[in-house]
Image: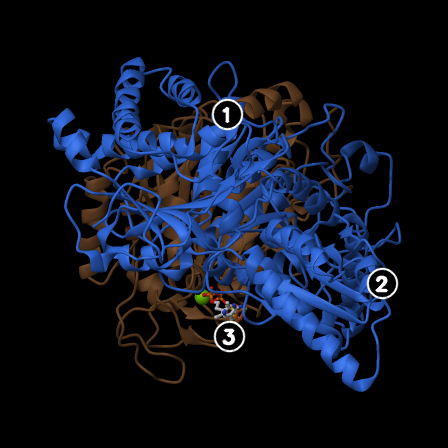
Chain colours: A brown, B blue
Amino acid sequence: MTYILKPKLHHPSLPKNALGFTRRDYEGRVSTLCAGCGHDSISAAIIQAVWELSIEPHRVAKISGIGCSSKTPDYFLSQSHGFNSVHGRMPSVLTGANLANRDLIYLGVSGDGDSASIGLGQFAHSIRRGVNMSYIVENNGVYGLTKGQFSATSDKGSKSKKGVENTESGIDLVALALQLGATYVGRSFSGDKEQLVPLIKGALSHHGPAFLDVISPCVAFNNHTGSTKSFDYVREHNEAVNRLDVILGRTPITAEYKAGEVREVTQHDGSVLRLRKLHDDYDPTDKIGAANYLQERHAEGEIVTGLLYVDPEATDLHDRLDTTARPLNQLNTADLTPGADALAKINASLR
Amino acid sequence: MPDTLTQGGSAKPAGLAAVNDFVVKFANVNGSGSASANGLFAKAIIRMGVPVAARNIFPSNIQGLPTWYEVRVSGAGHLGRRGGVDLAVPLNPQTWEDDVKEISPGGYLFYDSTKPLPASKFRDDIHIIGVPLTAICNEAYKIPRERQLFKNICYVGALSWLINIDPAVVEQLLKEEFASKPKLIGANLNAFNLGRDWAKANLKPIGLQLQTSDAVGDRIFVEGNAAAALGAVYGGATVCAWYPITPSTSVAEAFTGYCEDFRTNADGTKNYAIVQGEDEIASIGIVVGAGWNGARAFTCTSGPGISLMNEFIGLSYFAEIPVVIFDVQRGGPSTGMPTRTQQSDLLLAAYASHGDTKHVLLLPSDPGECFTMGAQAFDLADRLQTTVFVMLDLDIGMQEWLVEPFKWDDARRIDRGKVMTAEELEAGKFFGRYTDVDGDGIPYRTWPGTHPNKGAYFTRGTSRNRLAGYSEKGIDYQDNMERLLKKFHTAAALVPAPVVRSAKQSTKIGALYFGSTAPAMHEALETLERQGHHIDAMRVRAFPFSQEVFDFIHAHDEICVVEQNRDAQLRSLLMIEGGIDPAHLTSILHYDGTPITARFLCDAIGKRLEARKATRQVTGKADKQ
Ligand SMILES: Cc1ncc(C[n+]2csc(CCOP(=O)(O)OP(=O)(O)O)c2C)c(N)n1
Ligand code: SF4
Ligand SMILES: [Mg+2]
């Protein structure tokens, strides 16, 4: 028996998606973050993306670590199960959840402290393991929840709110994710909904480890001059390589862009990523090129955003493990327990 | 000087004489291929129907360091270590001195006599049996590797003559072992006969003799780690995440093997997922995630791994997520001692993590219970929505034990505990994630993706009310903590009950023990009884303790608590959880890393009881026996 989610009653003028839901049906509890926090914009982008993709909210599992960023799954998709786990360990919890039921969509939400400091190991290994997930780091270059310490993504030379200069070099999670084998890698900015929403949509429809680094200024501790993660700094140094549109397999493709400017990438599930190139020489399926480009622009003090790399033929952990198509949590006694006869044979082999 | 005869000079005690009741100890070099020869020796005796307790004592090393293999032959069926050595087979010059020292007076020393050794290397009060193993093998084999490997089977051949191992049994075992490589059957049999024939021509059988018996019955010979893994398969585990650590590694390895055999579909796809994590934190995280999402999941580790997993273990307690952990206990940190056995993780596991936490521990005493408790742990974890530890130790986990065959009832069904289905939610059944509707402290849960608009909730460690809403109110926190405590009390009634062995006479002395101590303890109890010490004994099989455990303690004037750790951890648990007066509990502790022996127990408990009698006589009190 299947159950169909009945849309709540809303104002009739609210736009509906293919399931008949409005964006309201994808909202969560009221946020408790500081007014103006970049993380709230990312939550809004997630709501928009899932709504636009017409995903049934309960088919999403939201998993996070600890931090202001990791609190956000409570503020979107209230019909989805969520798990605010432990600091830096979202990737392992998500991996286990994914192993238990391959049919859900796994959204991992983390912070830069959560993923680049305490959780760097789990970040790395979940990606190289090929877990099918959308891994979003809400990157403010600071520990928000513990009140403003530098994080490992803080750039060398950037200044804290108290004026202290960071002397350690910053980790670029995007560069790492590329190297570690993420098959969908993008970066965006919480203040750029136009760019962010399609990137999240592409990640959610990607089959494999999708990683998004979203720069998300912390208005309380990291939105001052001297910070390289402030709204102003990012707006000035943003170097977008492309603009993305995600078109589901079933949607007719319309030619919006001039030929020559558009590049289409068809993903495993039939969804089409349409990239409007801002840079002629940028090819998002060229991993080495992407890595080089990132380094070049970084040296120039620019933050490259957009879809940086995608492997449309990606595989995931289940493909590698050759797990049954049925979710493991649906297997029952008959599937799992070999029975008394098999045990008698094992006994015989042990005498 | 050494000579092959068992009749010594005037000072020499007569050779030990026993039928189906003696201890043989092999000393080898790790990686020299001796393990399979020693295993063949033990298995041949079992096939003759004579019970054997065999123990590998091995270093943290792949090649070169000393290893020992102790075979206790016990027609009476004692499967613990007895203590002492009757026949030593020291084939490792590095440990010769110690190995020779250990032999009981009148015992036997079997050695490779190819190179003459000075008289000072021997003892006058033991019987020396030299067999030129190297010379025999060098003559028979040209390839160095073969010379080394077949030397092992060669000494088994020589011993077979000396103690009367049936060669037909050995032949049969070799045929079974090398069924897929028939060439090896003949080659091994040849080597066996080389040794046997040489011994037959030059030596007389010794006083330690084997006699075919029917004392083994249909028992099986199996390691606890393999049994636990099989229990996980039968218990319905589908996700295993682990990080290698001795002595637990072979749980994951055996699980992999059994899953390949029993959980692979006709199209090659798998009804399981095994991930070698990057560390123990990731491993337990994967288990927590899988448990949250409705799969039966476990990890296997040892003390250092538990230390790393602490934060997640606490989360599983608070967030109420089923988790199974097989902890194969060993000595403390680093390498070396850690490949020895101990029961020293009890407190670590029982109260793992921060905040107020307590966890369910199952305490198997042999591989048979590793199987049953291994399977049961998954039902308990699902039913109680919490972490369940299965506490093995190296002695159980990595040694082959003779146990009753595994049993399974095909009518048994996996118990997924209180999981709300889409149908129940659709029908409007009340769902409050942390609400105690049944009065047992156990709430209902839903798995992600169950229903489009009912039953979703947000999981967090603390800070929630009965409906899983965010709350930092003290009253909500306390309410939740009280319910968790109630749930823990419920657990006490669900876990395996203790097993009592009453003394033949009524007594005010009791003993508590658990885990791998059991066989040595049973033997010691018999011996002590013969010496006039009557003791009621209770084998504790789980934590939390049931009321029975405390009733037993209160029904006796003195309780000996036997454990294989320094800090008397079971005793602490009894004091903490039952408010037991420390003076009521006498510790009997063995923690040098070797498995506890019956002789040690008789001595330690016997002394304690003698001392008790003496003070009672002085004070005029008499034991009400
Ligand atoms: C094991 C552990 N250590 C430390 C903390 C304290 N802590 C909570 S959030 C946090 C940092 C969060 O930073 P980030 O992931 O960047 O999230 P943000 O608040 O900036 O969004 C720390 C150190 C913790 N919860 N757990
Ligand atoms: S402290 Fe910073 S990261 Fe946290 S909620 Fe406030 S603005 Fe956002
Ligand atoms: Mg941060």
Name the quadrant containing residue B545: bottom right
Read off the residue under disc 2: B551
Q: Which residue is mark 3?
A: A146
Residue at 46% of width from left, 55% of height from top? B84
B353 sits left or right of B249 in the view: right
Q: Quadrant of residue A272?
A: top left
**In which of the image's four quarters is ligand 3 placed?**
bottom left
Relative image position of residue B247 (x, y in whole percent): 44, 49
Is residue A75 among the parts visible in the rendering? no
Comparing B24 with B576, the one in front is B24
Q: Considering only vertical position in the picture, is B595 above or below A132?
A: below
How far apart are labels 1 and 3 at the CA level?
Answer: 44 Å
Using the rendered image, report if marks 3 and 2 lie on a common chain: no
The circle drawn on residue B270 is 1
Residue occupying image coordinates x 77% and y 62%:
B465
Most foreground residue, A201 or B117: B117
Residue B166 numbered mark, or none: none
Q: In this picture, is A285 found above or below B95?
A: above
For the residues marked 1 and 2, what is the alpha-carbon distance in whole angstroms? 48 Å
> Does mark 3 have its CB less than 8 Å from ligand 1?
yes
Q: Quarter-wise, where is residue A13 in the image?
A: top right
Q: Chain of mark 1?
A: B
Residue flagged by tag 2: what amino acid is it?
Answer: Asp
Q: Which kind of residue does numbered mark 1 sit on?
A: Lys
Q: Quadrant of the N terminus of chain A?
A: top right
Q: Chain of mark 2?
A: B
Q: Would you say the residues marked 1 and 2 are in contact, meaning their CB atoms lie under 8 Å apart?
A: no
**Element class at badge 2:** helix
Q: Check if mark 1 and mark 3 are on a common chain.
A: no
